[in-house]
Image (cartoon, rainbow, N blue to C red):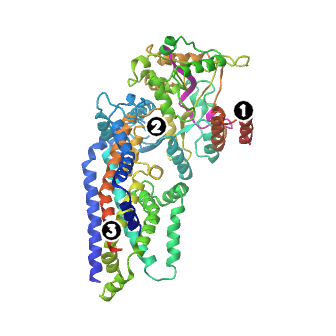
């Protein structure tokens, strides 16, 4: 529905105005990244000058070398990719299955279970920080991959479920009925009929889960203590002193940390537009 | 039903592929493990080699965990700490020390988490009621024997902040002095004089503001920005603690500015009771030992090792990270920057020392409250009377 609305508006608006607005928005969006790259190539003493951007006297590639070597970057990157990848995968699988169960299957407590899961949206992360630590500690799970994976999945699941259920509503029930007539089992309906049609919402959920957890630091710093499973935000910390920090290298680390997130966004963003277009035709 | 099997196998393959990818990732970066930081945290292979050494106690394998608030292990105070840890491990091959470091807020959050389930063996602490009272009430820190430290050269009174009911629970690392840093060259060029009274200070501030060497917006700048305005020559004065004295050694700062940084302490109020040698100074950060530590004796041994006068004090002084809480006169090299000497003189000539700043003297809620009230009164959004009333209610 929404897509049709914007299409109509687009036609009314004259093109140049639209382009000007889009260019302004694009500049606002992209500027922080340009700024980040710019600062990551300067030296610490050049920062805090008056200009918005700085022209480094000498381009400091050494910042990136330091980030890789001293910042333990590759190790943290591997952990981040592994933990985030698994979290995204789990969130998608669980949210599709539970959305289907709560929306399309008829059982007594379906709405109650859905409400219960969605209530997770209202729980602030910080409120669970210390209680979870205590639980993990009792179970001997601190400093393991589970200490991060479980809360990452748990906190992204309500959002995922919310999106999946609303997308699933737009899929006509007749499709499933036809599938049943043709002899489909329930898993086949779910994974072969429904899931392909949820592509756009899967991409959305994947992006949201990924971006949410990619920069997460509070839980990671509380639940982990050795280097084994530490994620990328810890890399920035390696350059934080008690009273002064090596900002230039921190910028380099942040640029490197932001890169995968930007790449994932660009990759999946295409699917979103595709999915939206498909949805428009179908609707 | 056949189809279900297919799906399961697809999922399994996917899961396996993920694991394999992860495996590749792990292999490709074993190199990065070689740096000192992960060395300290990695498995105990290094300690295995020479455990027969008679270095300490009975040669039993011991792993001590240090929880530190100094995440940067290659500069400043963090480097000093790491150097001492390495030395200790070299001298005591059976002891392995693992460091976990987080910065301020993350550190305090995790400290709370740890206090529920047992702290690491050695922890960074602050000798201020705002932090320490709650910790000591929880009884998670081990008591230290004050007599052990009689010849460690602690500055008199510096242990007080770490005591409760006359018992000692931690040792201070630094002496912090608050002062006005100023750019001497800028002062000379403009004919400004170091103020001796608070009225002169206010007048000077006005002059500096007119000259455009003043920050805009009192409460919109954070620490780093303020510092950078000063070290880039865009501000003439900068009020901060002695820990920033290492500015004079920082090669990143232009020499013209670096060599001209000087300091003066808070001038006297005309007609007030104070004298110029009453200074704002206190002993902030330090270390304590966990009450629940499995190797409490070993942890205390390491703590004492760190505080041997030729460790923390000496290395700290050499790295210009500020003054320790111990007598450092023995380690003066004669190459100290004038800035360092000014701080030393300020402390040595002090007729009275303020002790812990008031905002750190109450529980943490009091700290939050008083700090926001101070901000309101200083930026003029609150009258002095309202401020005093608000402080009064915060005290309750």
Element type at mark 2: loop
Tag shown at residue B384: 1
B196 falls in the magenta region: no
Q: Residue B307: image x %, image y %?
A: 50, 30
**CA–CA distance between discs 2 and 1?**
38 Å
Q: Residue A235: image x %, image y %?
A: 38, 43
Write down the region rendered in magenta: B161-184
Which chain does the residue under circle 2 lie in?
A: B
Question: Which of the 4 image quarters holds residue A267?
Answer: bottom left
Quick one: A3 or A160, which is closer to the camera? A3
Confirm whether residue A23 shows in the render: yes
Is residue B359 rendered to the left or right of residue B171?
right
Co-location on one chain, circles 2 and 3: no
Give the number of the mark in front: 2 or 1: 1
Q: Is residue A277 above or below residue A244?
A: below
Question: Which of the 4 image quarters holds residue B129?
Answer: top right
Judge the density around disc 2: few (<14), some (14-19), many (≥20) Cα neighbours within 10 Å.
Answer: many
Residue located beneath label 2 in the image = B70
Q: Earlier in the sequence, mark 2 or mark 1?
A: 2
Count of residue discs: 3
Element type at mark 3: helix
B181 falls in the magenta region: yes
Residue located beneath label 3 in the image = A199
Q: Residue at x 33, y 86 (%)?
A: A178
**CA–CA distance between discs 1 and 3?**
62 Å
Co-location on one chain, circles 2 and 1: yes
Is residue B190 rendered to the left or right of residue A69?
right
Q: Is residue A78 above or below residue A48?
A: below
């Amino acid at each position: 529905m929404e897509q049709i609305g914007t299409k109509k508006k687009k036609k009314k608006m004259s093109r140049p105005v639209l382009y000007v607005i889009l260019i302004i928005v694009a500049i606002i969006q992209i500027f922080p990244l340009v700024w980040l790259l710019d600062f990551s190539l300067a030296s610490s003493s050049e920062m805090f000058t008056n200009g918005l951007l700085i022209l480094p006297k000498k381009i400091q590639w050494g910042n990136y070398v330091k980030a890789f070597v001293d910042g333990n970057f590759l190790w943290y990157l591997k952990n981040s990719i592994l933990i985030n990848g698994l979290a995204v995968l789990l969130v998608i699988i669980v949210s599709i299955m539970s959305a289907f169960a709560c929306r399309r299957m008829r059982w007594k407590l379906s709405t109650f279970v859905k409400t219960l899961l969605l209530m997770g949206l209202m729980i602030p992360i910080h409120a669970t920080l210390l209680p979870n630590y205590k639980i993990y500690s009792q179970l001997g799970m601190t400093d393991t991959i589970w200490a991060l994976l479980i809360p990452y999945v748990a906190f992204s699941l309500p959002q995922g479920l919310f999106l999946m259920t609303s997308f699933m509503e737009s899929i006509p029930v007749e499709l499933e009925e036809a599938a049943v007539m043709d002899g489909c089992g329930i898993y086949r309906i779910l994974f072969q009929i429904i899931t392909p049609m949820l592509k756009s919402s899967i991409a959305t959920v994947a992006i949201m889960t990924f971006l949410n957890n990619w920069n997460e630091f509070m839980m990671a710093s509380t639940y982990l203590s050795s280097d084994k499973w530490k994620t990328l935000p810890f890399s920035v910390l390696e350059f934080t002193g008690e009273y002064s920090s090596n900002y230039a290298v921190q910028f380099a680390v942040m640029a490197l940390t932001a890169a995968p997130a930007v790449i994932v966004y660009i990759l999946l963003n295409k699917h979103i537009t595709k999915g939206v277009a498909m949805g428009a035709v179908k609707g | 039903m056949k189809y279900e099997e297919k799906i399961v196998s697809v999922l399994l393959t996917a899961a396996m592929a993920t694991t394999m990818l992860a495996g590749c990732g792990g292999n490709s970066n074993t190199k990065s493990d070689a740096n000192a930081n992960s060395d300290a945290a990695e498995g105990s292979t290094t300690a295995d080699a020479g455990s027969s050494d008679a270095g300490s106690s009975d040669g039993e394998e011991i792993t001590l965990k240090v929880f530190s608030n100094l995440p940067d292990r290659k500069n400043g105070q963090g480097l000093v700490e790491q150097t001492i840890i390495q030395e200790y491990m070299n001298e005591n091959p059976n002891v392995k020390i693992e460091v976990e470091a987080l910065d301020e807020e993350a550190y305090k959050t995790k400290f709370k988490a740890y206090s529920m389930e047992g702290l690491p063996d050695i922890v960074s602490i602050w000798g201020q009621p705002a932090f320490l009272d709650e910790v000591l009430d929880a009884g998670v820190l081990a008591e230290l024997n004050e007599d052990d430290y009689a010849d460690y050269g602690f500055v008199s009174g510096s242990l007080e902040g770490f005591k409760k009911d006359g018992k000692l629970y931690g040792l201070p690392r630094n002496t912090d002095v608050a002062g006005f840093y100023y750019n001497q060259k800028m002062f000379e060029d403009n004919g400004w004089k170091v103020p001796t009274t608070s009225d002169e200070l206010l007048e000077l501030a006005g002059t500096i503001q007119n000259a455009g060497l003043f920050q805009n917006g009192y409460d919109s700048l954070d620490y780093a920005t303020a510092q950078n305005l000063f070290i880039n020559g865009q501000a003439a004065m900068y009020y901060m603690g002695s820990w920033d004295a290492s500015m004079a050694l920082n090669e990143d700062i232009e020499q013209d500015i670096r060599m001209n940084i000087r300091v003066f302490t808070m001038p006297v109020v005309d007609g007030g009771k104070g004298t110029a040698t009453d200074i704002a100074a206190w002993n902030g950060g330090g270390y304590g030992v966990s009450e629940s530590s499995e190797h409490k004796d070993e942890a205390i041994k390491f703590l004492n090792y760190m505080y041997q006068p030729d460790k923390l004090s000496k290395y700290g002084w050499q790295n210009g990270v500020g003054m320790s809480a111990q007598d450092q006169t023995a380690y003066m090299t004669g190459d100290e920057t004038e800035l360092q000497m000014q701080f030393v003189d300020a402390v040595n000539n002090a007729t009275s020392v303020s002790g812990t700043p008031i905002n750190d003297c109450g529980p943490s809620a009091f700290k939050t409250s008083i700090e926001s009230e101070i901000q309101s009164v200083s930026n003029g959004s609150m009258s002095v009377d309202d401020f005093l009333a608000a402080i009064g209610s915060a005290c309750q």
